[in-house]
Amino acid sequence: MADESEDDAAAAVEGPLWTETHAPALEDLPQPKVREHLRSVVEEPMNLLVHGPKGAGKTAAVRALADELHENPDADLVEINVADFFDMTKKEVSQDDRFSQFIDSKRRRESSKADLINHVLKESASYAPVSGNYKTVLLDNAEGVREDFQQALRRVMEQYYEATQFVIATRQPSALIPPIRSRCFPVSVRKPTHDETVAVLEDIVEAEGADHDDEGIEYVAGYADGDLREAILAAQTTYEQEGEITMNTAYEVLGSLGADERVQEMITAAEAGEFTDARSTLDDLLVDEGHSGEEVLEDVLTVARSRYSGAELARVHQLAGEIDLDLHEGTNDRIHVSHLLAELGEMRAGR
């Protein structure tokens, strides 16, 4: 569930993210071996390959290390989210505030996207640190980098090793070419244990003064299933929506996260005439995830308001009203909501 709902949890948060306001210091990292490895790097800086599953705390660990390494970490830690970086168009790369300082108008006009990316990597590594003798360049989510860009990165690492420490964070270290792996000390960040997640959540909610009980914290930790970022966001979402973190409030709030995404998939399939797929998703929501027909119908209306307008939206509301009456008669939820999906398919087909 955590993989599907992390974006939903972040979107549901209204204030500053607890993942940022309570970012750990090096000594607060929950995994002893990670603390030990990174503490040794403070004494002897080196390139790192930080690897582990999603939400394990890789980025937080690198930021904690940078706070120890640099007098001015805001200036001397350069973060590049590789997944975002390489998905950008040439125009987006050249106009991004983080990279535009490295790209003049001539290069913007005449260079390919590949050349721009290579140039940004080189420039990020080449400029002098603000304080101290070196800076840190973090390449986050590096598993998706094409081999030709990895070769370019290898050359940059070779050229600027004296003034730049490279940290590559990834879920798949095997996706990196051997010359890069051989230039980095590996730091494995494992999936946090349930107890480690509980301990992190307790520290944060106590610092926030958030009303909670042990059962609520235990439930949130179990819900996140080893994704520390998801656990923190889920706790914050529950507290902001309900004013406390208990078993009941966490169940009510977190049980609905991710439902909109599944409903989006279900409606898209229905519109395309793929009713088998649409009904399969409906079965997941009703049976596997335990939502009632009324809850699914409410989510359908929420999604519909972002997809339809005018006469179409009015028609959806009319259909939903009819289905709602049928649901309150206590008959089969699946049959009635399936009827709505079929009507949505016919409505789009008749455009």
Image: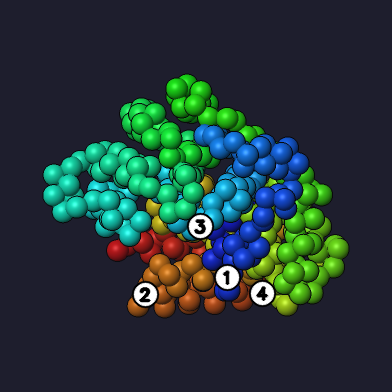
Q: CA distance from mark 1 to mark 4?
A: 11 Å
Decide if residue 218 is in sight here. yes
Mark 1 and 4 residues: CB-CB less than 8 Å, in contact?
Answer: no
The tag earlier along the polypeptide, 2 or 4, is: 4
Q: CA distance from mark 1 to mark 2?
A: 33 Å
Q: Where is residue 145? Give x, y as percent.
A: 40, 35
Q: Is residue 346 above or below residue 210?
A: above
Distance from the alpha carbon under mark 2 to that under mark 4: 31 Å
Q: What amino acid is found at the position of numbered circle 2 in the picture?
A: Ser
Asked if 45 appears above or below 317 in the picture, the reply is: above
In front: label 2 or label 4: 4
Q: Are marks 2 and 4 in contact (CB under 8 Å)?
A: no
SS under mark 1: loop
Instruction: Give the number of the mark in front: 1 or 4.
Output: 1
Kindly state the secondary structure of the residue where label 4 is placed. Answer: helix
The crowding category of the residue bearing disc 3, from other C-alpha atoms within 10 Å (few below 14, some 14 to 19, many at least 20), is some
Mark 1 vs mark 3: give the one in front: 3
Residue underneath mark 4 = 240
- Residue 206 appears at what percent x and percent y? 78, 69
Residue 254 spot, x, y in % from top left: 68, 63
At label 4, counting other C-alpha atoms closer than 10 Å, the crowd grade (few under 14, some 14-19, many 20 or more) is: some
Q: Toward the viewer: 186 or 281?
A: 186
- Rendered location of residue 109, percent (x, y): 14, 49
Q: Is residue 163 above or below residue 27?
A: above
Q: Are marks 1 and 2 in contact (CB under 8 Å)?
A: no
The residue identified by callout 3 is 72
Q: Amino acid at mark 3?
A: Asn
Q: Earlier in the sequence, mark 3 or mark 4?
A: 3
Kindly check if marks 3 and 4 are in contact, taking CB atoms under 8 A apart as contact.
no
Q: Which residue is mark 1?
A: 16
Image mark for residue 309? 2
